[in-house]
C-alpha cells in the first residue's frame, strides 16, 4: 500500500498540472487582446488630443458640478496699479431684458464663437454690457461682460453646462477680480426668466 502512495501522488500531480495548463491557455490570448485594445485606445486618445468643447459625455457623472469662474485679464491702469472692481449699487446690477436679435448685442457677440445662438439677453448697467444666455449645440452657456477691461461688452467670461444640468439647476458664472474683492456672480434659472446678479 505504501508503494502505491507515491505513485498515486505523482499521478494526481500530473493530472492537476494538465488541467491547470488547459485552463490558462484561453486566458493568455484574452489578456493579449485586452492589452491591444487598451493600447489602441491610448494611442487614439493621444492622437485626437482633447475632447472638442462642443461635445459632452453621453452619461455625465452624478458628481459633476460644472461652474465657471472667469478671472479677467486686467490691463494695468495708467498709474501702474491693477484695476479693482468698484462696489456697485444694487440698482446698477438690475438686468433689463433685451430682444435676442437686438442690434445692441453686436459688440457682445463680436468675440463669441459663431456656434452660440442667443436665447435670452439682458442689459446690466453696472457691468457695462449685456448678459447672454446662449445655446451651443447641446450646451447652455452664460456669458457676462468684464467691467475691468477696456471693452467690457466684447471681452467677456463664458461658462457652459450640459443641457441636463441646466434643466435641473440653470447656469452660473462668476467674475473674480485679481484682488479677489467685489466679485460678481450671475445665475440664470431653468425658467429662462429668473436672473440673479450679486456682488460679494
Image: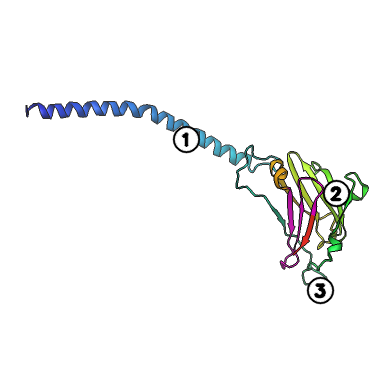
Segment tinted magenta in the rendering:
170-195
- Please say if 71 is above or below 163: below
Q: In which quarter of the image is the C terminus?
A: bottom right
Q: How many numbered dots are placed on residues in this image?
A: 3
The numbered mark, 3 or 2, whose residue comes first in the sequence reads 3
Residue on which disc 2 sits:
121
Tell me the SS state at disc 1: helix
User: What crowding class fits label 1: few (fewer than 14 Cα within 10 Å), some (14-19), or many (20 or more)?
Assistant: few
- C-alpha gap between disc 3 and disc 2: 35 Å
Q: Is residue 142 visible?
A: yes
Q: What element carries label 3?
A: loop
Q: Check residue 79 in the rendering and tell me which mark sits there, or answer none.
A: 3
Q: Where is residue 18 in the image (x, y as percent from the top left)?
A: 27, 26
Q: Residue at x 42, y 29 (%)?
A: 29
Q: Position of 165 compared to 133: left or right?
A: left
Residue 35 belongs to magenta span: no
Badge 1 or badge 3: first in the primary sequence: 1
> Which residue is at the front of the view, 85 or 74?
85
Can I make out residue 112 in this image? no
Instruction: Identify the image quadrant of residue 164.
Output: top right
Residue 132 position in % (x across, y down) = 82, 49
Residue nearest the viewer, comparing 106 with 174 = 174
Confirm whether the magenta stretch covers residue 192.
yes
Tell me the element at label 2.
strand
Residue lying farthest bottom? Answer: 79
Q: Nearer the viewer, mark 1 or mark 2?
A: 2
Q: Which residue is drawn at 73% across and 59% down?
A: 71
What residue sits 83% from the left and 43% below the top? Answer: 119
Q: Distance between the residues labelled 1 and 2?
A: 51 Å
Pinpoint residue 3: horizontal percent, then vertical percent.
Answer: 7, 27
Q: In which quarter of the image is the N terminus?
A: top left
The residue to which callout 1 is attached is 35
Amino acid at each position: 500500500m505504501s508503494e502505491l502512495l507515491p505513485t498515486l501522488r505523482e499521478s494526481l500531480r500530473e493530472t492537476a498540472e494538465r488541467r491547470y495548463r488547459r485552463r490558462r491557455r484561453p486566458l493568455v490570448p484574452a489578456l493579449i487582446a485586452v492589452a491591444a485594445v487598451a493600447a489602441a485606445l491610448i494611442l487614439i486618445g493621444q492622437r485626437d488630443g482633447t475632447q472638442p468643447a462642443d461635445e459632452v459625455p453621453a452619461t455625465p457623472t452624478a458628481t459633476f458640478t460644472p461652474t465657471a469662474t472667469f478671472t479677467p485679464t486686467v490691463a494695468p491702469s495708467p498709474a501702474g496699479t491693477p484695476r479693482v472692481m468698484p462696489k456697485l449699487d444694487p440698482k446698477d446690477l438690475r438686468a433689463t431684458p433685451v430682444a435676442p436679435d437686438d442690434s445692441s448685442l453686436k459688440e457682445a457677440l463680436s468675440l463669441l464663437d459663431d456656434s452660440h445662438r442667443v436665447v435670452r439677453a439682458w442689459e446690466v448697467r453696472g457691468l457695462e454690457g449685456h448678459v447672454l444666455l446662449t445655446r451651443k449645440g447641446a450646451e447652455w452657456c452664460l456669458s457676462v461682460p468684464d467691467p475691468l477691461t477696456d471693452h467690457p461688452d466684447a471681452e467677456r467670461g463664458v461658462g457652459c453646462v450640459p443641457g441636463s444640468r441646466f434643466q435641473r439647476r440653470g447656469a452660473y458664472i462668476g467674475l473674480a477680480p485679481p484682488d479677489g474683492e467685489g466679485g460678481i456672480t450671475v445665475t440664470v434659472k431653468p425658467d429662462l426668466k429668473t436672473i440673479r446678479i450679486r456682488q460679494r
